[in-house]
Amino acid sequence: MAAADELAFHEFEEATNLLAQTPNETTTRSDQLSPKGHVAVAMDSGGSYGAEDEVEESDKTVLLQEEKQQPGFWTFGYYQSFFDVDTSQVLDRIKGSLLPRPGHNFVRHHLRNRPDLYGPFWICATLAFVLAITGNLTLVLAQRRDPSIHYSPQFHKVTVASITIYCYAWLVPLALWGFLRWRKGVRERMGLYTFLETVCVYGYSLFVFIPTVVLWLIPVPWLQWLFGALALALSAAGLVFTLWPVVREDTRWAAGVLLSVVVLLHALLAMGCKFYFFQPLPPEPMASPHQATSQPPATMLPPTLPRSVAA
């Protein structure tokens, strides 16, 4: 009798309770039982189990569709993301570069892991054109004060200013990023900014020189140097305060040398622009007194006598 009871059909309590809760649902018997011998209960699309599965699958599909593939660096779409900023973000970063203060990291408080190339590109372009234009205006104003100064339009200054500013804004950050990457291999505790973050920091640090170059049109030498020193101090301070959290884990000697080189290169850029673009041309060469007296004096011929006297 025990063997007959084991072979008899037993109704599972779980399936009975499920059918009692949903009497309108259809059930199907599976010919192939699971390894544990459970009865498979299939519910139509109105059931709660099928709805939960569909919702889960739809969520996965949406997430997969939203996840975009990162384009290659040789494509236009790769660089398009670095120009995706609005006016408020650019103005906030310009304000942060003009008002540096200790403990205020430009990368952490203003970039927030979203560096852009829009601001640095136009800041460098504006600075190059302002340098060339104000350099020519300085010569025009100098000629009005001193007519002996010869002036002719110097269009080559646009090229010189563009090459100088863009090379400085790209090559110096590249060298700095490479040095910090090398030092991180030596000192593992050091932090590291990305190359684009370094370029962004340098680009926004040059904004303070745009109004300074315009103020250099004032023909007062000591005032020009005062404006230049103030702009250099603000710009260099922003770079030092931004780089200090990265280099402070390095040795004191390496950190001091690195920050000194950064400030020195910034000072060389400012002084080079001052001496090259704001120096008046020498006056036209005048005839020397020696050349004026070297010509032989004109000989005076005696007046011709009247014929009556000669006869």
Image (spheres, helix red, strand yellow):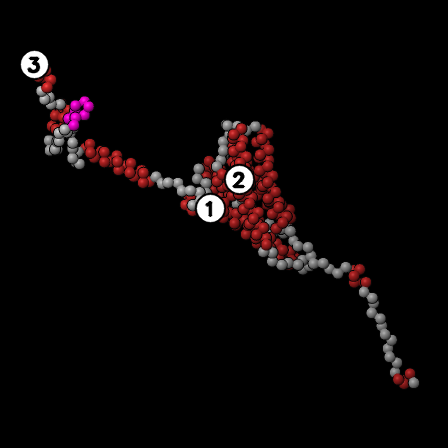
Q: CA distance from mark 1 to mark 2?
A: 18 Å
What secondary structure is the magenta-colored segment mainly?
loop
Residue bearing the label numbered 3: 1
| Residue 230 seen in the current view | no
Residue most extreme to the right: 311
Q: Which residues are magenta?
A: 32-39
Given residues 181 and 129, the one toward you in this image is 181
Q: Which mark is residue 162?
A: none
Residue 246 x, y percent position in the rendering: 51, 32
Residue drawn at 20 percent across, 34 percent down: 50
Q: Crowdedness of circle 1 by 10 Å Cα count: few (<14), some, many (20+)?
A: some
- The amino acid type found where label 3 is placed reads Met
Residue bearing the label numbered 1: 118
Establish if 164 lies above or below 35. Answer: below
Given residues 2 and 234, the one toward you in this image is 2
Q: CA distance from mark 3 to mark 1?
A: 88 Å
Between tags 1 and 2, which lies in front? 2
**Residue 106 among those drawn in magenta:** no
Residue bearing the label numbered 2: 174
